[in-house]
């Protein structure tokens, strides 16, 4: 699975789970999810559950960072690295 495919599947999850009441909201690949008010701390937990169920990736405690989970692009990069056996 490519990083682009991961990004698009994650975008669909974010749209379906968090933006369904904001149909005109445009979320860029590098927009910060918390800063834009898309997710809160509980939302981050939901995103992590999605990553585990959808991609088989479970972030370690020290990997739960803005750098790894802060934007759609960073999530896709993180998941791609983890699926390829690299540490993020």
Image: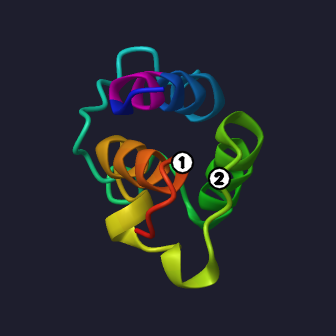
Horizontal arrangement in the rendering, residue 75 relative to residue 49 (left or right):
left
Q: Whole-percent x and y of residue 76?
A: 40, 42
Q: Residue at x 70, y 51 (%)?
A: 46
- Mark before the other along the chain sequence, 1 or 2: 2
Indicate yes or no whether the magenta region holds residue 6. yes
Residue 36: give x, y in percent of width and height.
Answer: 33, 50
Q: Disc 2 designates what residue?
A: 57
Which SS type dominates the magenta stretch? Answer: helix
Local SS, label 2: loop
**Residue appearing at x 39%, y 27% in the figure:** 2
Q: Is residue 12 left or right of residue 70?
A: right
Give the Cα distance between marks 1 and 2: 7 Å
Task: Using the image, determine if residue 39 lies above or below residue 7.
Answer: below
- The boundaries of the magenta stretch are 4-8
Tell me if label 1 and label 2 are in contact, CB under 8 Å. yes
Name the residue: 31% across, 31% down: 27
18 lies above or below 77: above
- Splitting the image into 4 quarters, where does residue 14 fall? top right
- The residue at the far top in this view is 23
Q: Nearer the viewer, residue 87 or 75?
A: 87
Label drawn at residue 83: 1
Q: Residues within 10 Å of mark 1 (few under 14, many from 20)?
A: some
Q: Is residue 49 magenta?
A: no
Identity of the residue furthest to the front in this view: 85
Q: In x, y percent, where is residue 61?
A: 62, 82
Residue plotted at (51% across, 58% down)? 85
Q: What kind of element bears circle 1? A: helix
Q: Quadrant of residue 23?
A: top left
């Amino acid at each position: 699975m490519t990083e682009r495919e991961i990004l698009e599947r994650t975008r669909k999850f974010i749209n379906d789970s968090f933006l369904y009441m904001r149909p005109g909201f445009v979320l860029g690949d590098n927009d910060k999810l918390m800063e834009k008010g898309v997710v809160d701390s509980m939302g981050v937990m939901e995103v992590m559950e999605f990553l585990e169920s959808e991609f088989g990736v479970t972030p370690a405690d020290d990997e739960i960072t803005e750098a790894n989970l802060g934007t759609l692009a960073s999530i896709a990069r993180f998941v791609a690295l983890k699926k390829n056996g690299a540490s993020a």
